[in-house]
Structures are given as structure tokens and as C-alpha cells.
Image (cartoon, helix red, strand yellow):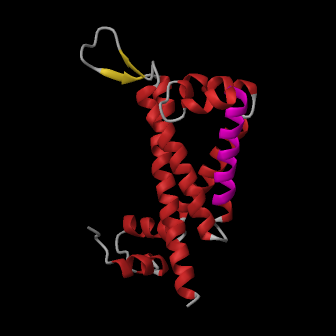
Amino acid sequence: MSLVPSGQAINAEKQDLSKDAKSNLAKLAAWINDRNIPFLITSIGMIVMLLWAGSYKMTAPGAEGIVPLVSNSPLISWHFKLFGPYIGSDIIGLTEWAAAILIIAGYRKPKAGIVGGFIATLMFFTTSSMLITTPGAIISVPGIHHMRFMSNLGLFLFKDVISLGASFYLISYFGRKAILSENQSR
């Protein structure tokens, strides 16, 4: 169930919200929206993270660092069995680069951004699932009964749940741009 009729959701992007805002708080929120700041921070942050993390995975310490994560994942453990940790990690790093490059291309060609967002979604879904499958990600603290906590490793993996949401947001944003572009070319 959508709160905004579908035709209005597409046209809302063109609307300047600052003229409708009355309180200072609403004006600030409208200013942020009107300048696409959430998209800019999310997309640039995602691009930098994917390029940086992808580069690190193509180093020996980066490859060795993800061995415990990948080897315990039912979704991707086959990857290192097939390619080994170094080539397997290089492939993961190159996939992250590809997603980043497609997101960059999405600024001009929204459908490329959609593909980049889908690649990132698949990657972050896989790594988010490692929160459950990696030993030591969820721990018991001595003296606190019946309570489990995320360790530093668990907190490191949990950031990928947030990145999963950001990937879906990018698909949505670039999808909206692609729809607008398709409708303008008619």
C-alpha cells in the first residue's frame, strides 16, 4: 500500500518542497530534499566504500581477512573452494569495483545505476547473512544470562545491513530517473 499515488511519486521529484514548508524544521528538511543531499551522500559514500573495499580485497591481507567470513557462509563458501582465497578475493574486489563504476555511470545513464545497485544489493545481502553464519559474530557476555550481543566482528558485519538498505535506495532513485527519462523520450 503506497501513501502517495504512483503518478505523484514520480512527479514529486520535480516539486520544490521549500515553498510549502512552514516551520524552520520543515524548511531545513525541504532544503536537504531539494538539493538531493541524501542521494549525494549515499551514492558517493557507496562508491568510495566499494572502490576502497574492493581494492583492499585485492591485497594479500584483504584476502586473508575475509577467509573466515566467506568459508562459513553457505551462500558463498563455494567461491573460495572453486577459486582459492586470493583469486576468489580478487573476483569479489572486482565485483565491488564494477558495482561502483555502474553507480557512477548511473549519474548519466540511470539504468547502469540500477544494475550497480542490484550488484551491491546481492553483495550486501550475502555479507549481511554472514552475521548469522560467522562464528564469534554474536557472543554471550559472562555474567549476563540469556542475553547475546554483537561482537566487534558482528558490528563490522552489521554495517552491511545498512549498506543493503542504501543499495535498495539507489535502485529506487535510479529507477525513478530511468522512468522519467523513458517518459520524456515519448
Residue 185 colored in magenta in the image: no
Quadrant containing the N terminus in the rendered view: bottom left
Picture residue at 27% right of the left edge, 20% below the top: 147
The image quadrant of residue 87 is top right
Please, what is the dominant secondary structure of the magenta stretch? helix
Residue 57 appears anywhere in the view: no
Is 30 rendered above or below residue 141? below
Q: Is residue 80 visible?
A: yes
Residue 97, given in percent of the width and then of the height, sits at: 69, 48
Q: Who's the residue at 49% across and 33% down the image?
A: 157
**Between 111 and 51, the one nearer to me in the picture:** 111
- The span shown in magenta is 85-103
Percent across and percent down for residue 89 are 68, 33
Q: Residue at x 73, y 39 (%)?
A: 55
The answer to whether residue 32 is above or below residue 185 is: above
> What x and y, as percent, mark residue 98?
68, 52
In the picture, measured across the screen, residue 4 lies left or right of residue 42, that is left
Residue reaching furthest to the top: 143
Closest to the observer, 87 or 123 = 87
Q: Depth check: give the residue in front, 22 or 176.
A: 176
Q: Quadrant of the C terminus?
A: bottom right
Q: Is residue 99 magenta?
A: yes
